Image: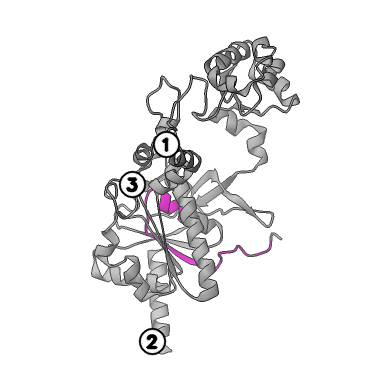
Amino acid sequence: MSELPLPLEGITVLDFSQFLAGPVAALRLADLGARVIKVERPGGGDLGRTLAFAGRMAGDDSMSFHAMNRNKESVTADLKDPDDLAFVRELVASADVMIQNFRPGVMERIGLDYDSVRALNPTLVYGSVSGYGDSGPFKDRPGQDLLAQAISGLPWLNGSSDDPPVPVGVAVADHLASCHLAQGITALLVRRFRTGRGGLVQTSLFEALLDLQFELLTTRLNDPTIAVQRKGERSAHAFLSAPYGIYPCSDGYLAIAMNPVPTIGRLLDIHQLASMTDPTAWWELQDEIERLISERLVTGTRDEWLAVLDVADVWCAPVLTLEELVAHDGFRAIAMTQQVSTGDLSLTTTRGPLRLDGRDLRSDRAAPRLGEHTEAVRREVAAAREHEGVS
């Protein structure tokens, strides 16, 4: 099974995008076997090359850039220069997929919007990701993760009733949008193989975050009385009753998911909870339930309580720090890391999160240096042009 070709081998993707959502969508396709050529501006390239996550660099580029642009090639082109634009249009004419995440109107001004490139290449699959879509009052706002979280209302779902809005601490909008874009591109490639027809797939950070909240939005749209009412400091969800939350132990924290309160009470020897058999009370007395659980759990270590709860098949888990995570046997067992290298630079990063035919999606190619493949790709284009002229 491991000898089977990856499903997108033979597919060429042009990645015009920057920062995260577009580049990570292209990365997903690269992990599935596609050849991804990153088209960057001369001089600086993708702004993500210098936007260093935690201030950490690897060579001339940020570690985060390496994480999301591994397994790609890089060519430079000034899209305002007629000769460079002509070169890029030749690339587009022979590509299978094109990805861009410029603000609405930018690609139209330089003639690389979908309607324009479809005339060059009717079979092209064109993927576009924006901040908030192509219309409406938000469309010209910067398409940045924290800003999209804010507009979507997501920060009001985190934290407790005494907290200000609490954003998710990772780029959740970008990552979700990248997955949706890669899914849409793959679907259009399947259609193209069946019909020969290209297509346009569009998504946005805003749509990705609205989709993330489909349970809440569906409930609210059908019952206007529903409102976000965050609970006490231990609650982990505004719309789930106790004991759902995160609780302190003497040496860390423990997460407890959906479980009957009497079961938790019996196992933790909390008599007030063991007799609480009416689920209505789990909502009405949520703060009191969480207080009693907290007072009990803080008297023992996290592992001591896990030993009690795991045996009873209670839905619970340790809350690991980053340091604990990377040192844990569970992290090592899933083999989520890989080594990538280029020149004298070698880095450890994550692999693709899918397994196909029993095979992890791995590649040892680090992110390209800016313009590293420009001359090689230009020679390919020139050779193809010469071949067409002969034929």
Q: Which mark is residue 224?
A: 1
Q: Is residue 155 left or right of residue 310?
A: left
Q: Nearer the viewer, mark 3 or mark 1?
A: 1
Q: Where does the image place residue 155, in percent across and percent down from the top left?
A: 40, 32
Q: Where does the image place residue 306, in percent across and percent down from the top left?
A: 68, 22
Is 11 included in the stretch rendered in magenta? Answer: yes
Mark 3 or mark 1, earlier in chain? 3
Residue of label 2: 389
Q: Is residue 20 visible?
A: no
Query: How far is the residue under mark 2 from the one under mark 3?
Result: 43 Å
Main SS of the magenta segment? loop
**Magenta residues, start to end:** 3-25
Q: Where does the image place residue 391, in percent across and percent down from the top left?
A: 43, 89
Amino acid beneath label 3:
Gly
State which quadrant residue 289 falls in: top right
Mark 2 or mark 3, earlier in chain? 3
Is 376 included in the stretch rendered in magenta? Answer: no
Q: Which mark is residue 143?
A: 3
Instruction: Say which residue appears at 45% left-offset and 23% top-offset.
Output: 160
Q: Residue furthest right?
A: 311
Amino acid beneath label 2:
Gly
Pointer 2 with pointer 1, Cβ within 8 A: no
Amino acid beneath label 1:
Pro
